[in-house]
Amino acid sequence: MSFCAFSKDYRERSFTSVENEFITKYLPEASGDAVRAYLYGLYLCGCAGEFDGESAAKMLRLPVKKLVDIFGFWEECGLVQVLSRDPLYIEYLPVSAAVGKPKPIRAEKYLEFNRELYKLLQKAGKDLRPYEHQRILEFLENNPMEPEAFLLVVEYCSKKDGAKLSSSHILNKAQKLVRAYKFTYEQVEAELADFNVHEKELSRIFTLLGIYRKPQDGDYDYLAKWDAAGVEPATVIAAAETLKKGSLATLDRLISELIEKDVFTEADAREYLERREMLTGVVFKVARKLGVKVQDPRPYVEEYAEKWLERGYEEESLLLVAGLCLRLSYGFAEMDRLLEEMYLGGIVDEAGVKEYCLARDRQLRLIGSIQSVCGVVKKTQAALDMVAVWRGWDLSDEMILEAAKRSANAGSPLAYMNKLLSEWKRLRITDPASIPDREASVPARTPSPIKSEAAIAADERSERERFYAARRQQAMRHVERAQKIASEDEEYRAAEAEIKRGEIELAKAEIFSPENLPLLEEHMREAKMKRANALTRLNLSERDFVPKYVCTKCSDTGYLPDGRACDCYQKS
């Protein structure tokens, strides 16, 4: 027995739910006593406590035998299951799952309907099979739609589909109208007339979007949605003309964007779409210059392009800056920060942007020359700014490159160059030949006053990193050689690909289908055997794909697993 139950007051105030399908399909054909018994039994299902068949029959003023016969009828309909007749015990089933005897259809009731249906089908050159005709009559029996209204649906579908007319399409259309509470001839006529009015509009939209099919019922839902939002039909056409290609779903996303921007009229839409197309073009052009792939341009338009153009930057200027950013390995965000700095500095017009980009280009060329000497200098905004400062000190490129030569062995070449150049600026030295004691400036021989403790520590750290990098490179050489030989062998490549696929399938099987694991593991073993045979033929082994480190303690990284520095480092 359950530990909780509804109180009597609660039960008296609650409700008994009856499925609508019972009311539409079964109630009209059942006797009054059968309906009373079904509903009363349904009510008793929700009541706690004992209530036998005799008590129910007494309450309904029916003989017990008749009550048993009534539930036998409902069992034939598939609505209940009689588990016991003496004593009577009933189990109610869902009405939607009922597969019992169908509601009887009186043929004489549909004589006139059948004649008109036959005429419409004959005109369309379509014959219905007996089971299709039966489905139509069952629909009329189970739904409140008038037969004359249904004939309108048949006429509409025959005109729309022609030789492709099907009973499924007719019934689907009728079901949709019933769900929209369109039952009478007048209601259905008005609804279908609205479809016909909008068919030309949809056909034009289809032509603009390159859709080569006839409008379907679901397509009209888009028109209804846009109309309900207050979008003019001409606005929809303008949006379709802008897209030129796509689906109704794509067009719906664009119109949703117009609604979001409070654009409803054709004039406003064309103005907005023209600017949107221009901004989108700018985004794609800048993306190509940056070497960035953009799929949805809208976020870039809203975050970057609109702001840049509103600040007065022209398209050509933006492409010049994008070309500069490509050389700096910048994306949209970095380019936006650069334009922000330019804007704050008053560099907006085309001439100013050209001059700025040319200056940056010269700086980049100089950094390239510095790289050829130092090797580890990166082309960053900070490096460009530093070069600009040096040039602002009236130091020539020769002086800057001379400082680069003297900083080649430093841990932080730019920082060391800055120290040298600032010293030369202080001494007002403008010619490399005038630099006193040139050899004293070479980092390897420079005494401590030139370098701070931080600079010395940075140099030592850089030297240590170069030492271990060289070791690791040496350890990887024979691995790269083995990989090159193996990758050129077709049998090895096929086995390797099979192993990778097998690893993925094994991971999935462990979660979703453990029963497949033995078979997949067998396939994996076979693939590994093929790989081993290929390696043997190539005079290779699995050991050839493992780096041979000089120090096995730190694997030539310089650091032990616990984070301490390894003692294998040897200063040159």
Image (tube, grey):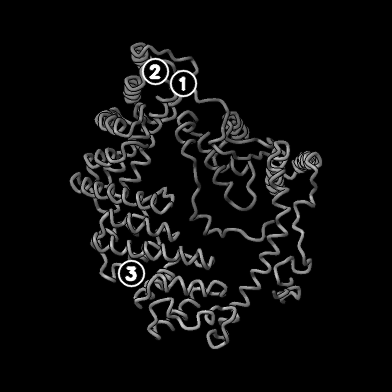
- Whole-number angstrom distance, CA of label 1 to CA of label 2: 9 Å
Q: Nearer the viewer, residue 82 or 242?
A: 242
Residue drawn 78% across the image and 69% down it = 553
Mark 3: few, some, or many residues within 10 Å (few <14, many ≥20)? few
Q: Residue furthest bottom?
A: 449
Measure how far apart labels 3 and 1 are at the Cα level.
82 Å
Confirm or deny contact between disc 1 and disc 2 (CB under 8 A): yes
Instruction: Say which element carries label 3.
Output: helix
Residue drawn 73% across the image and 36% down it: 491
Q: Which residue is mark 3?
A: 341
**Real-space Cα distance between discs 2 and 3?**
82 Å
| Residue at the spot of label 2 | 110
Give the label, 2 or 3, closer to the camera: 3
The x, y position of residue 249, in whole percent, is 38, 40
Q: Is residue 444 left or right of residue 395?
A: right
Q: Which residue is mark 1?
A: 105
Residue found farthest to the front: 433
